[in-house]
Image: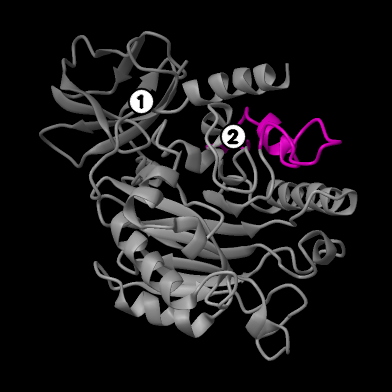
Amino acid sequence: MRRIFYALISLFCFSQLPSALAQSSADSFRVVTWNLEWWGSGSPHNTGRQVSKTQTLLETINADFYGFQEIVNVDSFQNMVARLPNGPWESIVSSYASLAPTPSNFNYERAQKLGFLYRPSQFRNVRSRAFLSGHPYAYGDFASGRYPMLVEGELRCSNNSWQPMSFIVLHAKAMTDNSSCNRREEGAYILKDTLDRKFSGKEFLILGDFNDDLDTSICGDRRFGAYRDFVRDSVGPDSYQCLTLPISLAGERSSDAYPSLIDHFIASRPLARYYINGSARSLRSLANATVSSYSKDISDHYPVQATFYRPASALLIESVSPTAACSLFPNPVQSQLQVNGLQDAAAYQVIDLLGRVLQVGVLDPFNPMLPVSSLPSGTYLLQLNQKNGPAQWLRFVKQ
């Protein structure tokens, strides 16, 4: 029954999102989360083979953004990044870890750290910090100081404008004992509560090793996973979309240690409208086909990937004309939109919030009716161009 319940949630949520095949790099960006299992530490993997094969896979995947977990040897990681083709690349490694609040702490060098890799041509004005470090319970809930890493910056849009975007790289508390399960559940609650209160309306993506599935729990005594509140909060402008829930329900896995998917993506609703439906997938098959002895030489986790439309413009909504000569009626509209105030014929475009042009034509000032019944429910922009005067932008809602 639990999987049926989550399957119905997944069907409802993802039927609301745009469906498309993967776009070219000019129109989309790809994000990967990847736990690299004690990367560069020399145990349990040979460091030389781990570095070499990780680089080979990075070149094969060739995504735009990567969130990493379990980076130990920072110098080795940065040296590998410097050798990557298709750059330039920039990387961030968290300045804290479990039992290591700063890089000068004795435990820092040998601890598992979070990392983020990105192309500066795609993401600029980047800054990072420990997320939730001021919360009184987060230290224990996130493996004694392994807080999520918040990476904020500006994402390049498809028309070369820029808009704010945040990534939250997560490595949740591991293990299946009762104490660990309770700490992981409370950590998920704190994370969502903080995002609900402080990140309302913002575009952000949670990615990483969640150490639990979304529709079930790796803890034998639990009915639901630690992230059930994210899964259930799927309706409304400040809700969440669990992008990897469908592939979890389909039986994909991201780790050799567990039969279920434990590496995930959760998008805020404002970001989820850019998600290319069906693009989330485990790269387990690709990893095993690209390098030999993957689990022996690289990690017990496999990379997981998701693809997003590249936004058209950060200024698109703000470009609505504040003193437009024309007006729309009714608004919201169901079938026919009347454009009032036309002085002569006007060329028009109907554009969605991804910047895609959905309708074009010419409006007659004596019969200025625009049919919109074929549009899905949502918010749209109408651009009007007449012979005299600048273009006008008007916003309308299709019910």
- By secondary structure, the bulk of the magenta-drawn segment is best described as loop
Residue placed under numbered mark 1 in the picture: 327
Height in image: 186 above or below 349?
A: below
Q: Position of residue 199 (x, y in %)?
A: 64, 51
The residue depicted at 38 percent of the width and 66 percent of the height is: 53
Please tell me whether residue 215 belongs to the stretch shown in magenta.
Answer: yes
Q: Is residue 203 visible?
A: yes
Height in image: 104 above or below 154?
A: below
The residue depicted at 67 percent of the width and 76 percent of the height is: 111
Question: Which residue type carries mark 1?
Answer: Ser
The residue depicted at 36 percent of the width and 40 percent of the height is: 320
Span shown in magenta = 214-243
Height in image: 82 above or below 161?
A: below
* Relative depth, front residue between 168 and 46: 46
Quick check: marks 1 and 2 in contact, CB under 8 Å?
no
Q: Position of residue 183 (x, y in %)?
A: 84, 54
Residue placed under numbered mark 2 in the picture: 237
Say whether residue 14 is left or right of residue 381: right
Picture quarter containing residue 48?
A: bottom left
Height in image: 134 above or below 225?
A: below
